[in-house]
Image (cartoon, grey):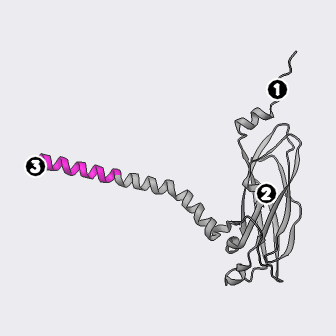
Amino acid sequence: MSETTAKLSNGQIVARCLGVIVLMGGLAWASVPFYDWFCRVTGFGGTTQVAEAGSETVLDQTIRVRFDASRARDMPWEFRAMQPHMDIRIGETGLAFYEAYNPTDEPIAGTASFNVAPFETGGYFVKIHCFCFELQVLQPGERVEMPVTFFVDPAILDDPEARGTPAITLSYTFHVTDIPEDYAALATPAPVAN
């Protein structure tokens, strides 16, 4: 084998290795948005669905929806569900409230992660409006009530794994989030002129 052929072969090997590295990096980068999309579409892992309006079909069959509230270890807020559960008809629009309180002497921002259990019901639990879609900033001593509007899709009765579910638990966990700079500038009082 000539020296030119050996160099060409080494160059090809390097190019192929770089191609594999770029491909693996691209797949790793795309895996998070792809997994998020997959969970939203299928309800996998208790990921809920989102709708603009309530269901057009309301059945006589009821289901219990339980409400759970927790905080990440570093979140200083107090956070609770204002009712432990409600029984609603499948397809009926429900309205529940959670309460958050900032007992500290500084503004704290938070965002909520959520899921439902059992996981197989995630594709049928549909949120119309939810505080989890927005950054929440509580001032020192501020207490707020946060609504969530939802329904259980009647299609749950067509799924052999989900149709016999007696109750669905909606869980939220609040996490500390950095306060955006533009919000901090708005929240800071302007200096008083003499």
Q: Residues within 10 Å of mark 2 (few under 14, many from 20)?
A: some
The reply to whether the magenta stretch includes residue 81 is no
Q: Secondary structure at mark 3?
A: loop
Q: Separation of disc 2 and disc 1 at Cα?
A: 36 Å
Image coords of residue 2 (percent x, y): 10, 49
Which three-letter amino acid code belongs to the residue tagged 1?
Answer: Ala
Identity of the residue drawn at 62% across and 70% down: 42
Q: CA distance from mark 3 to mark 1?
A: 77 Å
Image coordinates of residue 41 in percent, x first then y, are 61, 68
Q: Which residue is mark 3?
A: 2
> Label 1: few (<14), some or many (≥20) within 10 Å?
few
Q: Which residue is mark 1?
A: 190
Q: Measured from the top left, where is residue 82 in percent x and y? A: 89, 60
Along the polypeptide, which appears first: circle 3 or circle 1?
A: 3
Q: Is residue 181 above or below residue 8?
A: above
Does 160 sit above or below residue 106? Answer: below
Question: Is there any visible trace of residue 183 in the rendered image?
Answer: yes
Q: Which residue is mark 2?
A: 70
